[in-house]
Image (cartoon, rainbow, N blue to C red):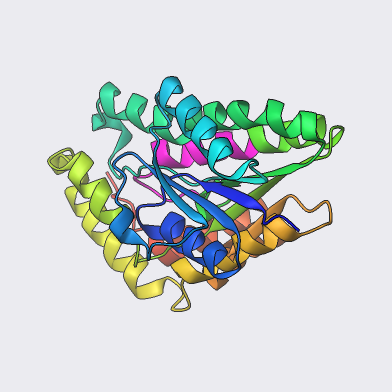
């Protein structure tokens, strides 16, 4: 049997790199894509191609998909993992950063999906896996733009899952929790350095303290997310959402099984500073 092929976006680090390695270990053909390709990130293997791909550039997308098909003759699974983070108060977040996050996280994911859908539809099979976040169920403060993109991906994915199912193409959502081992926090700080003006300084500091103190100790790991993505890619059922990490499972379960008022009260008491009284 010919080995199946997976294309992973954002494979230079974090969840994407761990996912590419996990599928390599399973004997899959892997197209590890990133904006600046670095073959040294992986051990050289016959079933690996490290390709340049910028999800905000349609020509780059088309070249990577064509190169992947030329290399292995098929793309069975697409993992839309590429994304960028931003943590800042919405009041002071520049339009340029808002647009950058939406262009990468949402519009880039849509463009990647559209690039492989015709191929998968004509073959009558394929899996598209979109990586979102537990923040799609439980948005936290200072992440309004990032959370907005993840909510949008959830709605997009659920909708297209119905229309593509007719042609044998499955759509899955993987929802990781907070993984401190990824560079999300660092990249967020690089992008928004100096954007947290004084009105929010005290709030942001108190929120981070509460989050580190009260957030579940059993947090998401890169390897754990890769394992869930493998399960989503090979699941023969019709499941749509796959929480990844004990913390994500807890937050999503709480959101599902409590009233909105109960859930918001729990979240605010657990993580947010006491509001100022004027």
Where is residue 64? Give x, y as percent: 47, 34
Q: Is residue 146 above or below residue 255?
A: above
Which quadrant of the view contains residue 258?
bottom right
The span shown in magenta is 139-155
In this view of the protein, which residue sits in the foreground, 53 or 92?
53
| 185 or 54: nearer the viewer | 54
Q: Is residue 258 among the parts visible in the rendering?
A: no
Q: Is residue 183 left or right of residue 50?
A: left
Residue 238, position as x, y percentages in the image? 83, 51
Q: Quadrant of residue 212?
A: bottom left
Residue 24 lies left or right of residue 116; in this view the side is left
Residue ranking furthest to the right: 166
Q: Please state which of residues 165 and 101 is positioned toward the viewer in this rendering.
A: 165
Percent position of residue 18, x then y: 45, 63
Look at the image and tell me in which quarter the N terminus lies: bottom right
Q: Is residue 23 magenta?
A: no
- Residue at x 47% of width, y 64% of height: 21
Magenta region, mostly helix, strand or loop? helix
């Amino acid at each position: 049997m010919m080995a199946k092929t997976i294309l992973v976006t954002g494979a230079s680090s974090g969840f994407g790199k761990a996912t590419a390695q996990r599928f390599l270990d399973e004997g899959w053909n892997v197209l590890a894509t990133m904006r600046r390709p670095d073959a040294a990130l992986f051990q050289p293997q016959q079933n690996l191609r490290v390709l340049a791909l910028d999800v905000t550039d349609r020509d780059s997308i088309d070249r990577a998909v064509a190169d992947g098909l030329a290399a292995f003759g098929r793309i069975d699974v697409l993992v839309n993992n590429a994304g960028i983070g931003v943590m800042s108060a919405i009041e002071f977040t520049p339009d340029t950063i808002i647009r950058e996050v939406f262009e990468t996280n949402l519009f880039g994911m849509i463009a990647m999906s559209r690039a492989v859908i015709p191929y998968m539809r004509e073959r009558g099979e394929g899996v598209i896996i979109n990586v979102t976040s537990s923040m799609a169920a439980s948005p936290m403060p200072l992440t309004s733009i990032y959370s907005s993109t993840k909510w949008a991906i959830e709605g997009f994915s659920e909708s297209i899952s119905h229309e593509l199912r007719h042609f044998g193409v499955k759509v899955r959502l993987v929802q990781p929790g907070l993984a401190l081992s990824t560079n999300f926090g660092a990249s967020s700080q690089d992008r928004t350095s100096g954007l947290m003006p004084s009105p929010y300084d005290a709030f942001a500091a108190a929120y981070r303290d509460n989050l580190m103190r009260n957030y579940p100790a059993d947090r998401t790991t890169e390897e754990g997310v890769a394992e869930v993505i493998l399960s989503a890619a090979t699941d023969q059922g019709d499941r749509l959402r796959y929480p990844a990490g004990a913390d994500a499972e807890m937050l999503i379960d709480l959101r599902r099984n409590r009233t909105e008022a109960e859930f918001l009260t729990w979240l605010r008491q657990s993580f947010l500073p006491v509001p100022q009284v004027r």
